[in-house]
Image (spheres, grey):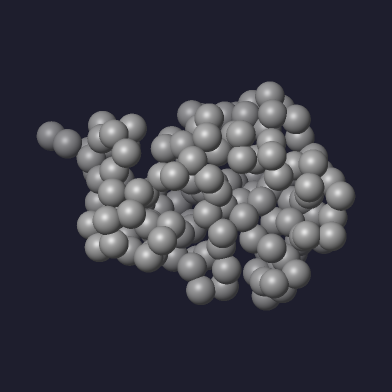
Amino acid sequence: MDSFVHIVCPECSAVNRVPQERLRDRPKCGRCKGPLFNLHPVDFNSVNFYKHIKNTDIPVVVDFWAPWCGPCRVMSPIFEQATSHMEPAIRFGRVNTDNEQSLAVAFNIRSVPTLIIFKNGQEIARHSGVLDHTSLINWIKKWTGI
């Protein structure tokens, strides 16, 4: 019997049901036909954030950042590299806290960058500050069991 996971499309936000064993086969969205994983973090906003967090069965790692933040600029390529390394086992996304202040308030973001891991719609881990690539991967693995 096949095991299925729900993945929210990064383009149109449709919820897709994908056989778990097919996640590495570059699945496409049933609605817009775009790739469900494109090896780049999804840009989250107040419209699509909760849909991704609550309807994606794989863990979601979110980088809360701001464009004026020096450490955020250091973290950005590291986060991109982790995305290309760990998708499709993990969904990666970003929230620009200047543009999405309501999300920053809702998750009590006091400093940027702040990383939060969500699983089954719930926060399971949080880290503030820059991590190098190896530390980021190890932190994600520790909390997700991937």
Q: Residue at x 65, y 40 (%)?
A: 79
Instruction: Count all numbered tags in the image, as a single digit.
Output: 0
Asked where in the image residue 13 lies, by quadrant, the reply is bottom left
Judging depth in this view, the residue of 132 and 119 nearest the camera is 132
**56 with respect to 25 (left or right):** right
Note whether 1 is above or below 52 in the view shown. Answer: above
Asked whether the viewer can see residue 16, the reply is: no
Q: Along the horizontal axis of the image, is 23 left or right of 139?
A: left
Residue 110 position (above or below residue 90):
below
Q: Position of residue 31 (x, y in %)?
A: 25, 63
Along the viewing direction, whichever of 43 and 118 lies nearer the viewer: 43
Residue 5 image point, x, y percent: 30, 45
Task: List x then y, in percent, for residue 117.
Answer: 59, 46
Q: Is residue 43 visible?
A: yes
On the image, the x and y values in percent for residue 78 come to 69, 36
Instruction: Quarter of the image for the N terminus: give it.
Output: top left
Which residue is rendered at x = 49% and y = 68% of the image?
48
Residue appearing at x 64%, y 44% in the figure: 125
Q: For the view shown, which residue lies furthest in the left direction?
A: 1
Q: Residue at x 52, y 54 (%)?
A: 42
